[in-house]
Amino acid sequence: MKKLSFLILSLFAFSFVFVACDPEDKPNVDDIVEDGFYVVGEATAVASLTADGANKAIMAVGFNEVLQSKDGVTDEEKVSAACQRAGMYEKYIVLEGGKPFSLVLKEGKEETKYGATLEAVELGGVDEQPNITVQKGVLAENTTMQVSETGLYHIVLDLNLNNDLPNKLILVAPVTLGVRGGMNSWGFSEMASSEINKNTITYTIEDQELPVGGIFKFAYGGGWKIQLDEEGLVKANTNLGKDLKPGAGNIAVEAAGLYKITLTYTLAQGDINSSFSYTAELTQASSMPENMYMTGTDFGGWTWGSEGIVSLVPVHSAAGSFWTIKYLKAGNGMKFSEINIANDWSKAFAGLGENIGFSFDGDGNAVVAEDGIYMIYVDSKNNKLAIEPAKVYLTGEALTGGWGNEAAEFLFAAEGNQLASPLFTSGGNLRIFAASSIATTDWWTREFNVFDGKIEYRGAGDDQAAVAVTAGQKVTLDFNAGTGTIQ
């Protein structure tokens, strides 16, 4: 009888353990409110830490943009780790105008509410900041804040754990999202917004023309970063790049054409990019050529597909535009084509609708009147072709005191069939660009440099590696040979 009673008790205990471990009784980890800073209150979608979905109100770890230029740090993951700042937090969140909100610090069972007396500060686009008015203040316990207008806001908080700021600071910036990239020469094009909702907003922009490999980023207010303190020790990125991470690399498209770009904001837990998703829909394929070649008496001997054919460099952010610099001999003809196939002249041309700086010989080939070094620029979109004496310039703060300056003091001079720069007045990183009278984009879209004695073009790619030079040196370029020297 004792054995039977023991067996019954054992079975009862086993069944209790089995029921207690039912997966349906486990807490949902997505509903767990972890330690951290939260943006809560009537102005938000989360009234308090006990509300449903409170975990979505948690602020993300902040990244100090000032640290992104650390020497030797190039890998994106390493950059992110290096730029984390202790006590800095960020959050994109919708705030309802005229309603209170606060920042709540949860540490175990303790909750501390913070707010601030916010004051308006006009940024005016200074130092690559957005051209907007923001609210700034000093954190204080047991108080609230509010904004006057309903909308999406970027909140940046720093607890001054490094003791390098005057106080614990907060910044509340209104977010007007748009795109910056090849579609606007890295200006700013505002996106249309859906009706504002505390949980989700959709932003769209249509008919954005991008070339093959065309690049862009999302940003707000036309800026790249935003400054928390007056000295600029702490800055937060105001742009979303690759994988929608703040300050990351460019977003690229594969095909040329017109795009409908959609960015969706959703209140979410996690890093900043957890709250965003995007699509880039090709709505109309481009009719612009993706390549451009040149042949002639001195370039491939009029034989497509042969050695000596010139492949023109694509102009960054300008679909259908290409350029090259060559030493040309007077009267020696040239033709161009978007294909480089032996005996195929179906796409060949010597001129377009508007032709600048050259004439045609009796066979309908493009020719120049004098020997010299020429800039050849093909603009298929605007139906223009220019062949003009080459103008190549030094640029960069270390060498010239500005960017894209076409002043005579920075202009290369001809030395036979080569171009030589002025002597460098100081040390720094060398940057060079070519100009054209029909170019429609910024100087860096026609940038190139010298690496290991060879001229390499930026084309449609990202920034080139730095090339350090010292005062008193100069660079000499032979474009026909594709070589250069720095000495």
Image (spheres, rainbow, N blue to C red):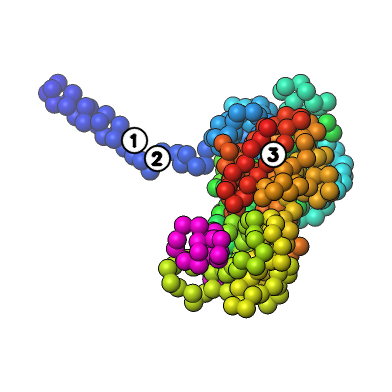
| Magenta range | 285-310
Q: Mark 2 — residue?
A: 25
Residue 446 lies within the magenta run: no
Q: Are marks 2 and 1 in contact (CB under 8 Å)?
A: yes
The image's mark for residue 21 is 1
Quadrant of residue 344 in the image? bottom left
What residue is at 69 percent from the left and 66 percent from the top? Answer: 368
Residue, disc 3: 475
Of the numbered discs 2 and 3, the one sitting upstream in the chain is 2
Horizontal and vertical percent for residue 85? Answer: 66, 29
Identify which amino acid the numbered label 3 is placed on: Val
The secondary structure that most of the magenta stretch takes on is loop
Residue at (34% x, 39% y) in the render: 22
Q: Residues within 10 Å of mark 1 (few under 14, many from 20)?
A: few
Quadrant showing the N terminus: top left
Indicate yes or no whether the magenta region holds residue 306: yes
Helix or strand or loop: what does disc 3 sit on? strand
- Tell me which label, 3 or 1, sits earlier in the chain: 1
- Indicate the amino acid at tag 2: Asp
Report x, y in % for residue 266: 60, 53
- Depth check, mark 2 against mark 3: the one in front is 3
Q: Which residue is drawn at 55% across and 66% down?
A: 296
Closer to us: 358 or 31: 358
- Residue 349 in view here: yes
